[in-house]
Image (cartoon, rainbow, N blue to C red):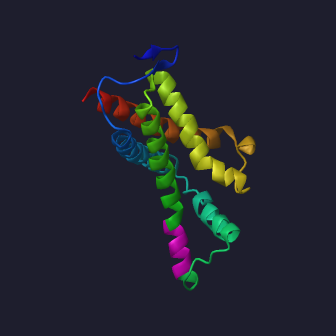
Amino acid sequence: MAKRTAIGTIGTGRRGISTLGWVLRGAAAGAAGTTALNAVTYLDMVVRGRGSSSTPEQTVEALADKAHVQIPGDEETRQNRVSGLGPLTGLFAGVGTGVAVGVARAAGFRSRPAVGTALIAGGVLVAANGPMTALGITDPRTWSASSWLSDLVPHIAYAAVVKTTMDAFDRL
């Protein structure tokens, strides 16, 4: 039996979807959310004429240094690999957060729309910015209002898409 709380319900769902089923649904929702995040980010770049962030590539470089792993290739090939690995870290964070949402759904957690969107946004912000902050690449405490806006708006779009997608899966 599901228990109602102020933030949503906790307990078994209406249908018998396995944990793996919810994990896969979460991964799909995370991929959809990542697409929304990227679209909002690229639209912001177009509208404001701003450049892309180099922090994903800096994160790859820092992680490789910490792990004592060489990224192979001559300078150009190596830089191309780093340029490809940077955005992949965002994909992993987005799909991984979706998987975490799927695990929560498998455990029976169903939040209200605003609460779920806020929780998911917080989770993906930590997943995306946590490694960069821990590695000293960025410090959100020093960000300007426009930097926060540039980061928050796409992550809220991500969260809204993930929440809406997961709720849609629950209604199927």
Looking at the image, which residue is at 52% across and 58% down? 89
In the image as oriented, which residue stretches furthest toward the bottom? 74
Residue 169 left/right relative to 95: left
The quadrant in which the C terminus is found is top left
- Left or right of 130, for residue 170: left
Which residue is farthest left?
A: 172
26 or 158, nearer to the observer = 26
- Assign the magenta stretch its main secondary structure: helix
Tell me, yes or no, if residue 47 can be seen here: no
> In x, y percent, where is residue 136?
74, 56
Q: Quadrant of residue 169?
A: top left
- Residue 141 x, y percent position in the rendering: 74, 41
- Give how far across and how far down residue 133 sits, in percent: 69, 50
Residue at 39% x, 48% y is: 31
Q: Is residue 43 left or right of residue 71?
A: left
Say if residue 82 shows up in the picture: yes
Quarter the N terminus occupies: top left
Residue at 65% x, 48% y is 130
Is residue 105 or residue 11 the one in the foreground? 11
Q: Nearer the viewer, residue 4 or 62?
A: 4
- As for residue 80 lying within the magenta part, the answer is yes
Please tell me which residue lies in front, 29 or 16. Answer: 16
Q: Toward which corner of the image does residue 144 lie, by quadrant?
A: top right
> Compared with residue 157, is residue 35 higher up or lower down, i.e. above or below?
below
Q: Which stretch is magenta?
A: 77-84
**Horizontal arrangement in the rendering, residue 89 relative to residue 2 (left or right):** right
x%, y% of residue 143?
70, 43
